[in-house]
Amino acid sequence: MKRVQSGIAIIGLLTFFSMFANALGSTRPLKQEGSQTKSDETIMTATISIDATKTKKISDHLFGIFFEDLNYAADGGLYAELIQNRSFEYSPNDHKGWNPLTAWEYTTDGFGYGTISVETSSPLNSNDPHYIVLNIEDEGQKGVGLSNSGFDGIVIHAGEKYDCSSFIKLISEKPIPFEIKLQNSKGEIFGEAEFTVDSKDWKKYPATVTATQSCDSCHFVILGKTKGKFAIDEVSLFPQKTFKNRVNGLRADLAQTIADLKPKFMRFPGGCLVHGDGLRNMYRWKNTIGPVEQRVGQRDIWNYHQSAGLGYFEYFQFCEDIGAKPLPVVPAGVSCQNSGGTWVIGSTGQRGLPMNEMQPYIQEILDLIEYANGPASSEWGKKRAEAGHPESFNLEFIGIGNEDKQTPDFRERFKMIYEIVKAKHPGITIVGTVGPDPTGEDFDLGWKFANEYKVQMVDEHYYKEPKWFLENLHRYDTYDRKASHIYVGEYAAHDVDRKNTLRSALAEAAYMTSLERNGDVVGMASYAPLLAKSGHTQWSPDLIYFNNTKVMPSVNYFVQKLFGENSGDKYLASQVTVSGDSKKGADLLPVSILKDTKSGDLIIKVVNVLPGSVNATIKIKGIDLKNSVGSRTVLTGLPDDMGLTPLRSEIKIGKEFQCELAANSITVIRLKNNSR
Ligand code: AHR
């Protein structure tokens, strides 16, 4: 590595500042073709002086996650159900061309025959109106039934067990033997089970199948083996191996990737999905609890179907399983302002619930709080206990509204909800909303309203180019600490072509250091969106991509993970001097120094968006380091790079030590306190 020891003198601050400006504006790799500046060349020296005697308390739950069922994040994604359209409720309202038999095929492989119909006259329950009637006139050699292709195929793993269940009702007189099979496209069978249907009433028939081989694209087959007529609904196939082995649980690898972020909170279930595409599409939490076959599936605002299998109980449970505080968001009594598509003639836009529905609606929100926190003897606490969780879920936050247009309809309804929830649950922090952008009419009106009603916290959103993040590192420095605190509920740096580049990840990292610095007024922040399934990605960039077999975290994910793993509750004063200039130093090399009181560890984060490495001297005063050991984790590459992961190594530390900060990098130095 070639070092330019006194590079400062040679290059000079002016050149340096213009490089930074180029870095801000650049959409190309900072390393130019033919340029002598290699990304590993030391071009600058810096001093980071830390004063551990000057600290301020910051939020101990600053970085979390935001889950929304977008990009097939839930059904076909995090929710481990393997059957698509298990309750035959898909419809053209969900998605053009869909119907109750989407993902299903009528199967008569062994030359059997019969008839199939979709019916509604005698359903399993009124929340699940459609079901299939099969009349087997001749069972042929193999039986007659249905085959499901899953969500782009069904993945099974050799030796693992899968729980299958179906609700079936005999319409003809005699019992019918059934067979279920996991088979590939060639018809090879990788697992099977049998049972007999014997009831004239709807009855659940469970079975367990052990996979004899692994297969990435199986389908599931259920066959009646003799002549007869029956109705069938709610056909489910679940791996027993889910995250923490939960029943009706989550896909283990994907959930683990999320858990590895060490999120301090989780906002759910959206996003736009919360306030919905029109009033009757709002996300109503009560529709999503209880036995899965009784839940109310509905159109997802992102143009597919939500089964509600991943519902409020599962969200709360997941939060608990990963140590994240739950942050449910409920509609503010108005639908999305873009309902029906703002560009479509006849679109409905924002609509408010009729006033006579508001009191029951507010009660629904109070019931949610009781469901989360109430004793198991209370009406809604009992339902939580019946689902297997008698203890409270310790709800501390609730969001009301998402990016709503600040209209009189919105304000009136928000106020009604806010006043009652606040009065009944003064201990719960209510998060209000200030529109979809970091500036503008809704932002200003939202803030005015929040100030008027002293809303404890408001949710700011921004999807901006990397440059914006680097230019706004001081956004919160001047926010009034006595006014509403901030939840940055959605943010992401959108680079050219909306790619997950290192450039975007470092812009987010630099910005996150500023959120830590302002952690006394910024209480929470979450990148958005979290998940995207390959082939079903409706919004990009996202944090974690996946298909049925693989999880592919983005480079932005590793930034979030570095911050999640290296959180603290005290912010330490520091001064960054670059080339003798202490005024611009902190802007050129955004840093954040935290202490984690529990472990006693000191954490230094430095983001270098410059095209060359910086030789930094780190000086620490006011803390005893004799029992501390250092590690350094670095994420670096070229600005356009995408598939990067951080590297960890040991580093010699002391009251004063050297650390080279690679070009285009984030470096996290952890001084682990071994005396505890
Ligand atoms: O994160 C994707 C969408 O962006 C959210 O649903 C919405 O709140 C925002 O506009």
Image (cartoon, grey):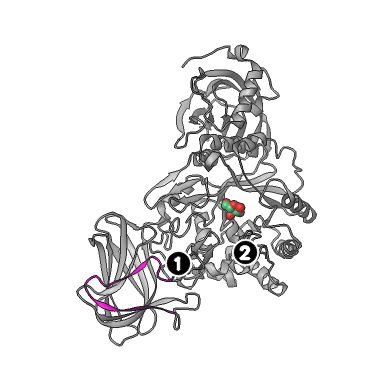
How many labels sit on residues? 2
Q: Secondary structure at mark 2?
A: helix
Cα distance between the residues tagged 1 and 2: 36 Å
Please state the horizontal and vertical placement of residue 575, each as a whole percent of the image. Answer: 67, 25
Reply above or below: 494 against 152. Answer: above
Q: Residue at x 51, y 37 (%)?
A: 501
Q: Residues within 10 Å of mark 2 (few under 14, many from 20)?
A: many
Residue 612's disc number: none
**Ligand 1 under 8 Å from disc 1 Cβ:** no
Let me know if residue 80 appears in the view.
yes
Mark 1 lies on residue: 98
Find out if the beta carbon at label 2 lies less than 8 Å from the nearest ligand 1 atom: no
**Residue, x 23% and y 76% (percent of image)?**
112
Q: Can you say whether 321 is above or below 382 in the image?
A: above
Q: Residues within 10 Å of mark 1 (few under 14, many from 20)?
A: some
Q: Tell me the element at label 1.
A: loop
Q: Which residues are magenta?
A: 98-119
Q: Which residue type carries mark 2? A: Ile
Instruction: Identify which residue is drawn at 52% across, 65% down.
Output: 299
Q: State whether residue 48 is above or below residue 397.
A: above
Tell me, yes or no, if residue 623 can be seen here: no
Amino acid type, label 1: Trp
- The image quadrant of residue 21 is top right
Which quadrant of the figure has residue 393? bottom right
104 is within the stretch colored magenta:
yes
